[in-house]
Image (tube, rainbow, N blue to C red):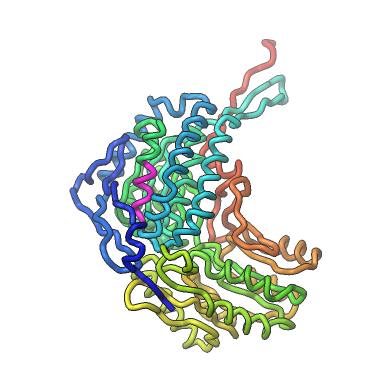
């Protein structure tokens, strides 16, 4: 199924790599140790560039710069409208450079180039625009209290923030984390994932050009167990905002607790159900299922990796779903006709293939896919299993790849019970034309976002985050801003009696 993977036909789209060093206090610098690591092109398995490998000493330097910028610099002290103005300048620069930014993520993380330019990256920009607009709308309350007291609340920036981000949406994650923190008046360091460091460094460069003062945004590239751990256990970071696996989220929270009790927000794994009821139009619902199941090659924490289908349409759904998935084109992410690019790295690729083997071994029916494809690169066929039961690993574990399980149900109660029978609770989908079913089920699902007759419908104003072991804290909307603010109450007597 693969065509043109790593083909020189797209070489004119491959950007020149300009930034490979850590970005600390407004300068690109080598790591203290001088060490570097390789970032790999998942299309070809070849090295793209050697990137500075930050560790504890580098995190210390970045925190020092961020602390200085917070304690003495202009950013937390300027008016919200001035911060918003500079953020709008940043927005203008990222918009002007969208072509190069999109290409960096395609090269580094195997993401679709055209989709990035047309939808995913403009969405990330809308998040920056939303929070630029929110920067001058941060204010407290006035209170008339008992005992002749009055008071007011001040919303103050929480301080130095550490953002630890994953590789599935490098640009999106960077902007979604930094924008609300910037609006709040915080200073910060970002640790991009080791698989996809390129766009974060480019964004840091653009932030400087926009006039965001030195030390406000620092980028420390490096590995999780070293640079990441140095952030979560740092004594002078006030808040850590993490997106990644549940397993690492737990480690981050432990480190935060045993160091300085820094505030934590976690956006973790998922095993989202899409519940399809008998009354739907099967063909249009399959489009929702394809998008939910295979978007970003399944490297998406909200992926609808469990599709629960009511028995009346189960057979038709399963047959057609497999047929449509077979028609998906797996290939070079720079090719405009490609639907699915390569998995991000060898480790993920092997992990996904091993889950496919589990599915086969545990007796699920492989409807389509199930194999790697192409001679080189980390390509996997879109894979669908049917006859999946709740106890199979493919039904319980987050696979983070293009592997979807279809599960049959009879009643609404059974659908709700199956949908909720997971330790995760990030997202869920419901496909039905029955308003009463949609309302009943959406109230019964324990998940942070519910999509009815749509999927992956995000908006900068719409809060999003986890229930249960998918974490806590919200991204987007004003809720996404509050985690970067402290509330201080100021109380005075109304009269001197
Ligand atoms: P995934 O499983 O999606 O690769 P991870 O949770 O492993 O996600 O990684 C998400 C981010 O967390 C990455 O930036 C990674 O480097 C970082 N990370 C990994 N291990 C740790 C750790 N022990 N402490 C802090 N950050 C970590």
In-front residue for pair 39/180: 39
Image x and y of residue 293, in percent: 56, 70
Q: Above or below — where is 430 with respect to 457?
A: below
Asked if residue 291 lies left or right of residue 450, the reply is left
Per the picture, the main secondary structure of the magenta-coloured stretch is helix
Q: Give the range drawn in magenta.
A: 196-204
- x%, y% of residue 382? 49, 76
Residue at position x 59%, y 62% in the image: 425
Quadrant in which residue 431 is drawn: bottom right
> Which residue ends up furthest to the left in the rendered image?
34
Task: Identify the residue at horizontal 37%, vertical 49% (top origin).
Answer: 191
In this rendering, the answer to whether 25 lies above or below 195 is: above
Q: In the picture provided, is 317 more to the left or to the right than 131? A: right
| Image quarter hosting the C terminus | top right
Residue 55 appears in the picture as rendered: no
Viewer-closest of 246 and 284: 284
């Amino acid at each position: 199924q693969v065509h043109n993977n790593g083909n020189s036909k797209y070489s004119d789209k491959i950007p020149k790599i300009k930034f490979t060093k850590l970005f600390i206090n407004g300068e690109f610098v080598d790591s203290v140790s001088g060490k570097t690591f390789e970032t790999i092109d998942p299309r070809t398995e070849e090295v793209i560039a050697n990137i500075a490998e930050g560790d504890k000493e580098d995190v210390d330097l970045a925190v020092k710069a961020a602390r200085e910028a917070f304690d003495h610099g202009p950013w937390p002290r300027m008016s919200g409208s001035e911060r918003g103005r500079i953020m709008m300048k940043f927005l203008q620069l990222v918009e002007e450079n969208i072509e190069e930014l999109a290409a960096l993520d395609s090269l580094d993380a195997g993401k679709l180039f055209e989709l990035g330019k047309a939808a995913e990256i403009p969405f990330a920009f809308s998040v920056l625009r939303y929070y630029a607009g929110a920067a001058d709308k941060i204010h407290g309350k006035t209170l008339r209290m008992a005992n002749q007291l009055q008071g007011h609340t001040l919303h103050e920036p929480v301080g130095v923030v550490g953002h630890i981000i994953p590789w599935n949406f490098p640009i999106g994650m960077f902007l979604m984390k930094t924008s609300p923190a910037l609006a709040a008046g915080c200073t910060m360091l970002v640790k991009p994932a080791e698989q996809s460091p390129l766009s974060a460094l480019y964004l840091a460069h653009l932030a400087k050009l926009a006039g965001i003062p030195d030390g406000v945004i620092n980028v420390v590239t490096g590995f999780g167990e070293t640079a990441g751990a140095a952030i979560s256990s740092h004594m002078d970071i006030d808040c850590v905002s993490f997106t990644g696996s549940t397993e690492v989220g737990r480690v981050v929270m432990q480190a935060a607790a045993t160091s300085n009790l820094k505030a934590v927000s976690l956006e973790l794994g998922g095993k989202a159900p899409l519940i399809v009821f008998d009354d739907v139009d099967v063909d249009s619902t399959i489009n929702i299922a394809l998008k939910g199941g295979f978007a970003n090659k399944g490297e998406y924490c909200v992926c609808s990796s469990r599709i629960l289908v009511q028995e009346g349409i189960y057979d038709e759904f399963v047959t057609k779903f497999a047929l449509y998935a077979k028609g998906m084109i797996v290939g070079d992410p720079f090719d405009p006709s490609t639907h699915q690019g390569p998995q991000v790295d060898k480790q993920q690729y092997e992990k996904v293939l091993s889950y496919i083997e589990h599915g086969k071994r545990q007796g699920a029916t492989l409807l389509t896919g199930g194999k790697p494809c192409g001679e080189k690169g980390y390509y996997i066929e879109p894979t669908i299993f049917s006859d999946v039961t709740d106890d199979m690993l493919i039904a319980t574990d987050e696979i983070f790849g293009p592997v979807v399980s279809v599960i049959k149900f009879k009643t609404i109660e059974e659908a709700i019970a199956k949908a909720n029978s997971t330790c995760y609770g990030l997202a869920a989908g419901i496909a039905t034309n029955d308003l009463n079913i949609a309302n009943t089920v959406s109230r019964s699902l324990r998940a942070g976002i519910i999509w009815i007759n749509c999927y992956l419908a995000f908006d900068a104003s719409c809060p999003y985050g986890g229930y249960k072991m998918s974490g806590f804290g919200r991204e987007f909307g004003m809720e996404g801003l509050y985690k970067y603010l402290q509330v201080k109450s100021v109380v005075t007597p109304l009269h001197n009696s």
